[in-house]
Image (cartoon, helix red, strand yellow):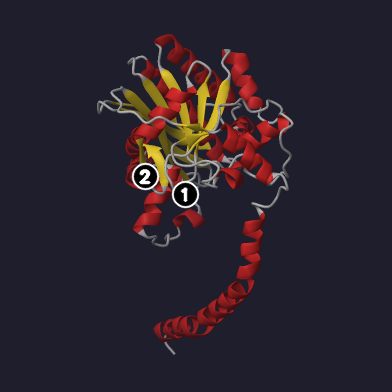
Amino acid sequence: MSEDDGTAKLDEYMQTTIIPRDYSKMLEDVARDVDDMVNKIEAFTRESKDVERIKDIVRKDRKRVKPEDLDLEIYGVDGGEGYRIYQSVVMYLVRAVAWASTDDVLTTWRYGILTRTRTPRLRIAAIRTILEAGIAATAASENPDWIMLDGPIVPHHDLRGADEDSPTKRNYWGQVISTRVDMLERCEDEGVNLVGVIEDCNSRHLIRFLEAQGLAKARPRLRDVAVLADTSVLDEGERTSAFVPPYEDYPVFRTIEERSGYKIRVMYLRTTREGPPLRVEIPDFVDPDAAASVIFSTAVDYNGYGIPIHLVMADAFAKVEEGVLDWIEDNIRKELIRRGREDVLTTVFKRLRRESRPKPLASKTVEADIKRRHGG
């Protein structure tokens, strides 16, 4: 039997014997366990006996947002990132963009090589956060009425891990905090309103706040979305009161206040009937009613979320396309060959085996969503 015949028989065996039988059993198991999966999903809304009490508290304190015809200059700020992991290094490109309603675009970027460690994504995420704060501060110097961040004003505490993962001991977390403080100070000095818009409410800010006030008690797995997804609690065009999350649970809020003097308040705002509410962060020099009105009045339906158009446009400009990374990689390879360092190509700058595997094709919708959420 020739090698080609053997390959053909193996392909035939794989297609007719292993795959259908394995998938058939898998589908039977899934069908049998669907009820159990659904019960577990539903359990997340029944985690607390006090959930109805929490809903009642929010209902009584919710506020109607007044939409307005806006004649304001608004900048939307977002970032994008792309990277490639090799045997010993990580190549990255990070962008930050501020898009104005006047079609002005401000942009900055950083690219380079990082030593490969356990979690290079944390360092790249920290760099992106630093650049976003920097471009927002630059935009504030243009004297717009508002600046909207795609994401929180208070950086996520996980970014502290970027320091631990840095072999050069660079103070990534210190830069994240200092650039946020600079951004806040610049906005207040220039008389610019600043808001941070987060696309989901899968946090526990509200529940933790109510617990700290002695108004509610909830189990650890209960999330704000279990309360706020109910449109009878928060309907389109309604928001919660603005509150400061308890510092014991969210110490980075305290860090920002100690470093800048500003308290950062949180509120939830539903901008579409079907989509989940947005989480909004504002410094204490911004009026919650004005912030909610601007966000609600500029929101458009974007992949099931009601997102301000300025953030949609900033996201489009901030994407890092795969083709740009291909171009950078190709130029590095050519330069290494020109220097006679083919040995580096087969060691340090060699792609990991899993990175070299052909990737399955995704539908255009899924592919677009992945790029939107992860920066290309």
State the image quarter where residue 137 is shown: top left
Quadrant housing the C terminus: top left
- Asked if one can make out residue 204 in the rendered structure from this viewpoint, the answer is no
As shown in the figure, which amino acid type bears the numbered disc 1? Lys
Sooner in the amino-acid sequence: mark 1 or mark 2: 2
Instruction: Say which of 199 and 114 sits in front.
Output: 199
Residue 55 x, y percent position in the rendering: 62, 42
Q: At 59% from the left edge and 72% from the top edge, which residue is drawn? A: 30
Q: How many marks?
A: 2
Q: At 40% from the left edge and 34% from the top edge, which residue is drawn? A: 296
* Label number found at residue 301: 2
Residue 92 x, y percent position in the rendering: 44, 38
Which residue is the extreme one toward the top?
Answer: 189
Circle 2 residues within 10 Å: few <14, some 14–19, many ≥20:
some
* Label number found at residue 350: 1
Residue 20 x, y percent position in the rendering: 51, 81
Left or right position of 317 against 370? left
State how far apart marks 1 and 2 are (Cα).
42 Å
Q: At 42% from the left edge and 59% from the top edge, which residue is drawn? A: 359
As shown in the figure, which amino acid type bears the numbered disc 2? Asp
